[in-house]
Image (spheres, rainbow, N blue to C red):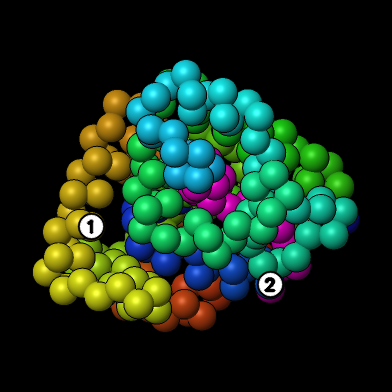
């Protein structure tokens, strides 16, 4: 069986995580939770009481930390992240880990090293005939530009704010919709205006298949993407 890569990018709370899980199950693939790798590093910093902006300490910690998906010979379709052999998939879902991830990624050298690891992992899995699914914000532009399938998943800011609000509620965190909308708008501005690898402002021009899920449920969104994959005869 020939392996290939599906790269799904898009703004915060656009539903990437849910769609990736559905696609991974449908295609019996492997999800490389790219954002989770940064969250794992942030968690390691929190545990080691390392300041996120301390470049030397963060890079030293990264160099000695194993961040993986687990046993590559027996990977589950459920995305997992391991930190030095410990399953931290749930531990990295906290707001503190999310905020920390946004900070450590700005440390010079961190992104380059983690992307290097992601590329190496992707190549290994594809060479073994695996369907690899990456999600993030520039996976198709930077992490794996040769991906056979490039999807840009988006939704209106209001819809994304409601989705993020529900995610937080499941964790016992309650924020007003207005507060969530402000956070989404701030995050969007950061993601589209950053100097290094900004979110695509013209996805179709950049080679993505654009999917707006504002008026779609997760299964309708999945099916649209599956139809696109089928049309490519991979």
Residue shown at 49% from the left, 28% from the top: 58
Density class for disc 1 (Cα within 10 Å; few <14, some 14-19, many ≥20) is many
Q: Where is residue 56 in the image (x, y as percent from the top left)?
A: 47, 18
Q: In which quarter of the image is the N terminus?
A: bottom right
Q: Main secondary structure of the magenta part?
A: helix
Q: For this view, does 48 lie left or right of residue 76?
A: left
Magenta span: 26-43
Label 1 SS: helix
How would you rate the neighbour count of disc 2 (Cα within 10 Å): few for under 14, some for 14-19, many for 20 or more? some
Task: Write down the quadrant of residue 164 in the picture.
Answer: bottom left
Q: Identify residue for label 1.
A: 184
**Mark 1 in CB contact with mark 2 (< 8 angstroms):** no
In the rendered image, the vertical position of residue 138 relative to residue 11, given as above or below: above
Residue positioned 50% across, 45% down in the render:
47
Q: Quadrant of the C terminus?
A: bottom right
Upstream in sequence: badge 1 or badge 2 = 2
């Amino acid at each position: 069986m020939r392996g290939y890569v599906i790269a799904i990018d898009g703004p915060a709370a656009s539903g990437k995580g849910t769609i990736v899980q559905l696609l991974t199950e449908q295609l019996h693939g492997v999800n490389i939770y790219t954002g989770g790798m940064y969250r794992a590093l942030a968690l390691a910093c929190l545990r080691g009481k390392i300041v996120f902006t301390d470049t030397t300490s963060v890079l030293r910690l990264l160099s000695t930390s194993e961040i993986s998906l687990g046993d590559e010979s027996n990977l589950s379709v459920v995305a997992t992240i391991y930190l030095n052999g410990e399953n931290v998939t749930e531990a990295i879902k906290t707001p503190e880990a999310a905020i920390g991830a946004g900070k450590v990624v700005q440390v010079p050298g961190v992104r380059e090293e983690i992307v290097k690891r992601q590329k190496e992992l992707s190549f290994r899995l594809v060479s073994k005939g695996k369907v690899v699914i990456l999600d993030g914000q520039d996976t198709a532009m930077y992490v794996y530009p040769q991906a056979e399938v490039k999807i840009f998943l988006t939704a209106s800011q209001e819809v994304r704010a409601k989705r993020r609000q529900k995610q937080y509620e499941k964790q016992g965190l309650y924020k007003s919709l207005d507060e969530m909308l402000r956070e989404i708008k701030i995050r969007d501005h950061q993601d589209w205006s950053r100097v290094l690898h900004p979110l695509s402002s013209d996805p179709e021009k950049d080679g993505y298949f654009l999917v707006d899920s504002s008026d779609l449920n997760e299964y309708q969104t999945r099916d649209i993407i599956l139809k696109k994959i089928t049309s490519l005869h991979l």
